[in-house]
């Protein structure tokens, strides 16, 4: 479980505990066959997803409002659209192989899919060839040593089936005003969509990571882990030098950076002044914005 999800679950726990037995009621009603692994919240409801394609929409009294089951699908990411009754889910399907973002409402009705019409099959073939050399070599070696196994080649997604991305969708975020949707896949291709699900921009992120998370500072500015900021309107990137090996979480005008094995001090970076403060247990810090 990543830190972002852990923080959301902690907030949920504190919220429900303030209603006495509310949190216990919620826990007793969870019906995910493999446990909830993804959570996204709005002011009025929240959505949880399990490993088996089961999704539940809850209110804050612990009551299940609706259930969605996506057969033969692995759920990779979920995000609620602010100030609306709509939410997004990034999934991987196998028959056919698709990496797709779907939009649902709180009545569990599918509204639309986010389809990137600029993807072409030649580009998919090339990207898979460039990014899977070691896998292809391993398959070839096993096939040569054990010809009776009849190993299959890597299955490529097909444009004809409609795709949001050509690889696993690792994160989805929606701007606070609900006008922009951003998503990123395992090849670190970042895509920007409008609220109707139409693609407006696409770009490659060079951050040396395979597990990239996205956060909005505001409706025009995006933080891309571990240390990149992006202007949604201009498409301009800014790298925050010195934080490449950290993980970062933005808080308004600040970014909290932490090192995954705690061997380096936590830091607070001020976006306005570019000042960096090392955090330690002997001091107390107060920030306001």
Image (tube, helix red, strand yellow):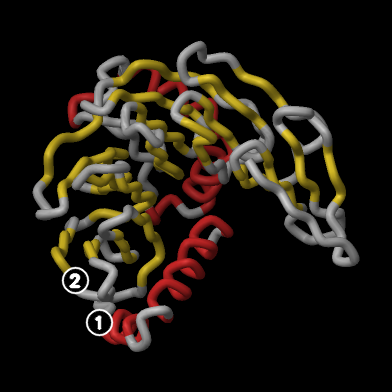
Disc 1 crowd, CA 10 A, few/some/many (<14, 14-19, 20+): few
Q: Which of 62 and 32 is in front in this view?
A: 62
Residue 100's x, y, as percent? 28, 38
Q: Mark 2 points at which residue?
A: 64
Q: In this view, does 268 lie above or below 220?
A: below
Q: Is residue 207 above or below residue 40?
A: above
**Residue 96 seen in this snapshot:** no
Residue 237's x, y, as percent? 61, 19
Q: Nearer the viewer, residue 19 or 32?
A: 19
Q: How many marks?
A: 2
Disc 2 crowd, CA 10 A, few/some/many (<14, 14-19, 20+): some
Residue at 44% from the left image edge and 43% from the top image edge: 171
Q: Do the residues labelled 2 and 1 touch (CB within 8 Å)?
A: yes
Callout 2: helix, strand or loop? strand
Q: Is residue 33 above or below residue 101?
A: below
Callout 1: helix, strand or loop? helix
Residue at 35% from the left image edge and 80% from the top image edge: 19
**Residue 122 seen in this snapshot:** yes
Q: Name the residue under label 1.
A: 29
Quadrant into which the C terminus falls: top right
Tell me if 264 is positioned left or right of 196 in this view: right
- Toward the top, the furthest residue is 234
Quarter of the figure with residue 118: top left
Tell me if 134 is positioned left or right of 274 in this view: left
Q: Distance between the residues labelled 2 and 1?
A: 8 Å
Looking at the rendered structure, which numbered label has been put on residue 258? Answer: none
Residue at 29% from the left image edge and 85% from the top image edge: 25
Of the image marks 2 and 1, the number of the one nearer the N terminus: 1
Residue at 36% from the left image edge and 69% from the top image edge: 36
Residue 190's x, y, as percent? 47, 28
């Amino acid at each position: 479980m990543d830190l972002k999800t852990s923080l959301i679950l902690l907030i949920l726990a504190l919220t429900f505990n303030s209603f006495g037995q509310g949190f216990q009621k919620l826990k007793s009603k969870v019906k995910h066959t493999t446990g909830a692994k993804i959570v996204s919240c709005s002011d009025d409801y929240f959505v949880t997803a399990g490993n088996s394609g089961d999704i539940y929409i809850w209110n804050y009294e612990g009551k299940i409002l609706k259930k969605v089951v996506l057969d033969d699908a692995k759920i990779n990411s979920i995000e609620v659209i602010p100030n609306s009754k709509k939410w997004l889910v990034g999934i991987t399907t196998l028959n056919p192989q698709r990496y797709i973002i779907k939009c649902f409402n709180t009545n569990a009705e599918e509204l639309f899919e986010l389809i990137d019409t600029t993807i072409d099959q030649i580009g998919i073939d090339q990207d898979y060839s460039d990014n899977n050399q070691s896998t292809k070599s391993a398959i070839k070696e096993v096939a040569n040593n054990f010809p009776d196994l009849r190993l299959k080649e890597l299955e490529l997604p097909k444009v004809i089936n409609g795709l949001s991305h050509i690889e696993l969708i690792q994160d989805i975020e929606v701007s606070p005003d609900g006008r922009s949707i951003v998503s990123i896949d395992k090849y670190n291709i970042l895509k920007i969509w409008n609220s109707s699900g139409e693609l407006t921009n696409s770009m490659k992120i060079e951050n040396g990571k395979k597990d990239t998370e996205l956060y909005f500072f505001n409706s025009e500015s995006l933080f891309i882990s571990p240390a990149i900021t992006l202007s949604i309107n201009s498409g301009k990137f800014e790298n925050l030098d010195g934080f490449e090996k950290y993980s970062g979480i933005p808080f308004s005008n600040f970014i909290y950076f932490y090192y995954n094995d705690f061997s380096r001090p936590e830091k607070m970076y001020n976006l306005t002044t570019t000042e960096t403060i090392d955090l330690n247990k002997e001091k107390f810090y107060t920030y306001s914005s």
